[in-house]
Image: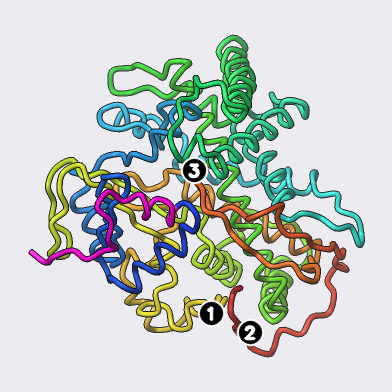
Amino acid sequence: MIPTPGPPGRFGLRNLVRFSSDSLGFLRRNTDEYGDVVRIKVLNTDFYLINHPDHIEEALVRKAKVMGRDAYIEILVYTLGLGLLTSDGDLWKRQRKLMAQAFTPRRIRSYADTMVDVVQSELHWRADEVINIHDEMSRLTMEVVARVLFGTGLDARDIERVHTAMETINEYYANSPEAVFRVPTQVPTPRNIRLRRAVQQIDEVVYRMIARKRAEGLGDDLLSTLIAACDDGGQGMTDQQLRDEAVTLFLAGHETTALNLAHTIYLISKYPEVERTLLAELDGVLDGRSVTQDDLKQLPYADRVLKEGLRLYPPAWTTGRAALEDVELGGHQIPKGAQLLFSQWIVHRDPRYYPNPEAFDPDRWLAPEMKSLPRYAFFPFGGGPRVCIGNHFATMEATLLLVTIMQRYHLELLPEQRLEVAPSVTLRPKGPGLKMRVRPRPARASRNATEPARVSRAS
């Protein structure tokens, strides 16, 4: 076996401090110094940072049966319950089969019109208005997931309550010492009290919607599909299971897409050549009309723009597993009980796979060498049996929303604005988010997209 290198530390307290204060920098420095498999001691627990795509694939796919839920996920259980993200074993297998009934290709396509309708009805930006792009994308995707999940059952007040509660939950996991040090939620700290109230607000809305659907009949929304779903024995989900999956979809379904959109719009605003090329494609395919799901295959540049945004700023910046038994990865012995980390942030910026990796270059995905890219050199939605069940939903939603926004608005980044990220459960903006000025776009404005898009550093 190959000895596994890593930073010194008998108990790992210094490593905890360094990781907590600068997670991305800590992972980057250890990768640069120690290579593809790095052993990091943190509070007497062994963490293994796995940086090679082949080793990641081996762990997430070929050896998935000996990989369990990682320890960090446990702190999400109070909020999410035992949904797909947090459950394990037989419960996870059953829930995955039931949830799959709501994410068939036909059902995903059926949500497209709702997504576009929500964007068109909710976008009311005024000329020269200054907006917080992260807040606006969060608000927009919350409206989308609420309509898709619950149909027309939620009113504006309920959506606002859920949105506020979700922001409280996100803030807790992003900045809370209670989350980092796993202080029990029963301890009445101010942050814990706010978290409990936020969960109670969401529960009140979700359980009310479940009761209404059961009493008044099911519709075409996603929650109705989950209520109707049955396993091989004819058993459906309990109200508790429905609640846990609905809250998981609420959190994951709006947060990750909102971040992808905000970061991609930020990148587009910095590189006008990319924007011109994108607009030329939209004009050529749509000619001013609203986008539909059937148009997506004819919008390859829009797809590449979002894919490049996901590469540079993956909302899920790291994926974790726990070794259920001793396992070998890339010649390194990983002991039972060790925690494994696979960082999208690190791998997506690896120069071995991405020339000029800091550059925002949507056309890099056309390069011949990208056809031989290792499968897990790009894994924004995780991988293996636990790959995000909503990945196709999220991709479709992000594309439809981006196209609709870009058809109507040009968004200018205000001077001195720079994207800095704070890794939490997701890769969120550090501070209040980015400010952008709204410029309404003239219908079918003349655009010159003949010159190739130049690339620059994403930061």
The percent position of residue 218, horizontal first and vertical second, equals: 57, 20
Name which residue lies at 74% across and 31% down. 160
| Secondary structure state at the residue bearing disc 3 | helix
The N terminus: image quadrant: bottom left
The percent position of residue 255, horizontal first and vertical second, equals: 59, 45
Residue toward you, 214 or 135 = 135
For the question of whether residue 101 can be seen, the reply is no
Which quadrant of the figure has residue 236?
top left
| Side of 15 where 333 appears, left or right | left
Pointer 3: what residue? Answer: 106
The magenta region covers 1-19
Q: Residue 409, relative to residue 424: is it above or below? A: below
Disc sitting over residue 363 in the figure: 1
| Secondary structure state at the residue bearing disc 1 | helix
For the question of whether residue 298 can be seen, the reply is yes
Amino acid at dot 2:
Ala
| Side of 193 where 334 appears, left or right | left
Q: Give the distance between the C-alpha atoms of the residues marked 2 and 1, in whole angstroms.
A: 8 Å
Name which residue lies at 85% across and 67% down. 441
Name which residue lies at 73% across and 43% down. 118
Task: Of the two numbered discs 1 and 3 on the same chain, state the one appearing first in sequence.
Answer: 3
**Disc 1 vs disc 3: Cβ atoms closer than 8 Å?**
no
